Image: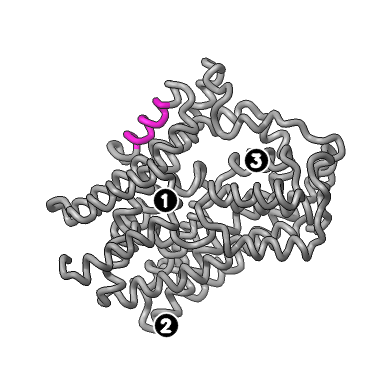
């Protein structure tokens, strides 16, 4: 597939660093990329554009716009794309791998603690206190995404329709997103003014590219490059899948995880919170791998660790395998395999999207129909996240369908007010909720 670097913009940057200098930066980033997508993008902008000046502002904005066009975690894709521009395929692999690796080990440990020591009051209190904070975080995300994307009243209709489709009609997430995309294309033909100045990062698409880089990606705009990328992806995906089929069979949890999380990776438009609605529905209601409370805890743990928020899928994979471990394998080994398989299936397509689509960034960013479809999807995502917030709130604030949990309600309300008033980072707020939960349990109130 080659490792030839693609020259960065000819303006606004001091020059491409050496591979090993960039290697050290991507390694460092993996340990400090707290704060979810917004925080991670801000860190990369500060480090790469403002301080190190490895990347120009126009290139960074184009890369951000491109990553928002794709399914999957946008901050991870942004890192892979920028590294690909600097050092080719090997740069992208290094950046993407380091972006998630530290969080893999941290979340693996936290996942194990959450199931192995649930009878210990401290651990039980920690998990109990995290849950209402997550409700506040998701509710805050609804408002933040709505403010950024619903630039026209008609786009608000997309959000309401998506919420009703999921919450009332119980339509599948992929169908809801697909209908939103089609509606976006139709609306663009009928009311093109709706798509001016809003949508899926459209404001960045018009940024001019330096002449030196207009043809820089042409070497990758070939059928041979596309075939090589697809071939490598298929081999990397099929070998473990066939191995799982041969070893465990089609009904085994590990095989099901490989299938499901690969499928989820291709429909995860709209960011982590949007796909969590889909994953929560399938993992809780279809496969019965987790309870709603466990899903909320997993999101809380992912919020408090470095790495992409979508790393919550590792927690889901771990718990699903832990609960269904066969007698012929140690439980911890089986659960660890479940976690690692889930991470692999979730992030492998991310590399495919960048290495296959990056040479066509200008065409993708400038395609009006694609932009319209993604504007419709992004507007619908507000309703999707609202559905997730209601899903969590009903099950945490009213456990077992009974009366309201006063502690959870107060912590959720307080956390929401703090997020709205002080813009506190979630990785600061989650530990506070954990401490409150531990105190509540140790004092004997639960």
User: Where does the image place residue 17, in percent across and percent down from the top left?
Assistant: 80, 57
Q: Quadrant of residue 109?
A: bottom left
Q: In this figure, which colouring scheme has been used for the structure?
A: one colour
Whether residue 172 is visible, yes or no, is no
User: Where does the image place residue 185, in percent across and percent down from the top left?
Assistant: 54, 25
Mark 1: few/some/many CA within 10 Å (<14, 14-19, 20+): many
Give residue 276's mark.
Answer: 1
> What separation in Å lies between label 2 and label 1 (alpha carbons)?
29 Å
Q: Which residue is mark 3?
A: 66
User: Where does the image place residue 261, in percent across and percent down from the top left?
Assistant: 48, 57
Tag in front: 2 or 3:
3
Question: In screen coordinates, is 166 left or right of 407?
Answer: right
Callout 2–callout 1 Cβ contact below 8 Å: no
Q: Which is nearer the eye, 345 or 400?
A: 400
Q: Quadrant of residue 372?
A: top right
Q: Is residue 439 magenta?
A: no
Q: Which residue is mark 2?
A: 329
Q: Which is nearer the eye, 38 or 163?
A: 38
Q: Which residues are magenta?
A: 156-165
Q: Identify the element where label 2 is drawn.
A: loop
**Secondary structure mostly seen in the magenta stretch:** helix
């Amino acid at each position: 597939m080659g490792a030839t670097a693609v020259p960065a913009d000819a303006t606004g940057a001091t020059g491409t660093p050496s591979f090993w200098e960039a290697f050290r930066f991507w390694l460092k980033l993996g340990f400090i990329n707290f704060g979810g997508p917004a925080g991670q993008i801000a860190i990369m902008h500060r480090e790469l554009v403002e301080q190190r000046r490895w990347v120009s502002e126009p290139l960074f904005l184009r890369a951000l716009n491109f990553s928002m066009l794709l399914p999957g975690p946008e901050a991870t894709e942004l890192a892979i794309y920028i590294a690909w521009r600097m050092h080719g395929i090997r740069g992208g692999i290094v950046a993407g791998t380091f972006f998630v690796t530290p969080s893999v080990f941290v979340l693996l440990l936290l996942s194990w603690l959450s199931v192995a020591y649930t009878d210990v009051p401290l651990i039980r209190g920690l998990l109990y206190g995290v849950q209402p904070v997550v409700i506040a975080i998701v509710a805050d995300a609804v408002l933040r995404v709505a403010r950024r994307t619903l630039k026209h009243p008609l786009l608000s209709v997309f959000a309401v329709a998506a919420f009703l489709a999921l919450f009332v009609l119980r339509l599948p997430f992929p169908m809801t997103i697909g209908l939103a995309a089609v509606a976006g294309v139709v609306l663009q033909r009928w009311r093109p003014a709706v798509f001016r100045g809003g949508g899926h990062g459209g404001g960045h698409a018009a940024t001019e590219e330096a002449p030196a880089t207009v043809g820089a990606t042409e070497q990758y705009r070939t059928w041979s490059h596309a075939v090589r990328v697809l071939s490598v992806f298929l081999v990397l995906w099929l070998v473990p899948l066939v191995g799982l089929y041969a070893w465990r069979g089609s009904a085994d949890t590990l095989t099901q995880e490989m299938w499901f999380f690969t499928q989820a990776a291709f429909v995860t438009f709209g960011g982590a919170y949007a796909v969590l609605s889909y994953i929560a529905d399938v993992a809780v209601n279809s496969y019965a791998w987790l309870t709603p409370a466990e899903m909320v805890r997993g999101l809380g743990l992912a919020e408090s660790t470095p790495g992409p928020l979508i790393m919550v899928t590792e927690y889901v994979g771990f718990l699903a395998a832990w609960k269904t471990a066969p007698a012929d394998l140690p439980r911890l080994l089986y659960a660890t395999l479940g976690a690692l398989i889930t991470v692999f299936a979730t992030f492998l397509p991310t590399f495919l999207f960048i290495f296959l689509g990056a040479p066509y960034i200008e065409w993708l960013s400038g395609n009006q129909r694609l932009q319209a479809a993604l504007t419709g999807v992004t507007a619908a995502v507000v309703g999707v996240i609202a559905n997730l917030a209601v899903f969590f709130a009903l099950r945490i604030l009213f456990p077992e369908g009974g009366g309201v949990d006063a502690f959870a309600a107060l912590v959720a309300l307080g956390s929401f007010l703090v997020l709205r008033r002080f813009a506190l980072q979630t990785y600061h707020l989650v530990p506070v909720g954990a401490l409150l939960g531990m105190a509540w349990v140790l004092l004997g109130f639960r």
